[in-house]
Amino acid sequence: MCSLLCLAGKGHPGSGQCFDCASGKFSSEGSTSCSSCSTGLYSGAASLSCSDCAAGTYLTNSATSVEFSAYKICSEGTYSSPASSTCTVCPDACVDCPTGYFCPELNGR
């Protein structure tokens, strides 16, 4: 029996026809199914891979899409690295950023 292989960003749920992966899912070339993004990552529809959340933001659940604005911004006095699922309280060594800005370096707040 032959198996249907789909183009990247597509999968088939046993239907014999390839469909775009839903937001929050991805697939590589030659896949048969779409996989969910891990916690801290997101994707749009028909994605080849998942992307990291930006530093200073986080996602608490997997299979999320940026279109749904599911990401959260870390509160004052906390930070996150890219692809984080939580924010961490800044140690005393954190550097204050001006209001309305973010610090791209580690330990910025």
Image: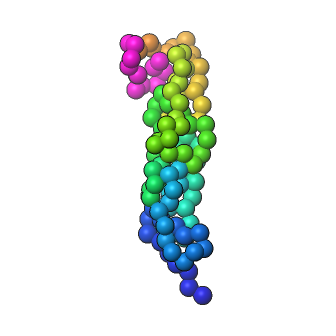
Residue visible at 53% across and 30% down? 72
Front residue (pair 69, 3): 69
Where is the N terminus found, in terms of image quarters? bottom right
Residue 14's spot in the image, x, y percent?
60, 73
Any part of residue 64 in sight: yes
Q: Which residues are magenta?
A: 98-109
Residue 99's spot in the image, x, y percent?
40, 13
Residue 47's spot in the image, x, y percent?
44, 56
Residue visible at 57% across and 49% down? 63
Any part of residue 83 in sight: no
Rendered view: 22 above or below 109 = below
Residue visible at 50% across and 45% down? 65
> Which secondary structure dominates the residues rendered in magenta?
loop
- Asked where in the image residue 60 lies, by quadrant, the reply is top right
Does 102 lie within the magenta span? yes
Front residue (pair 85, 24): 24
Rendered view: 99 above or below 82 = above
- Asked where in the image residue 3 lies, by quadrant, the reply is bottom right
Q: Residue furthest bottom?
A: 1
Rendered view: 91 above or below 104 = above
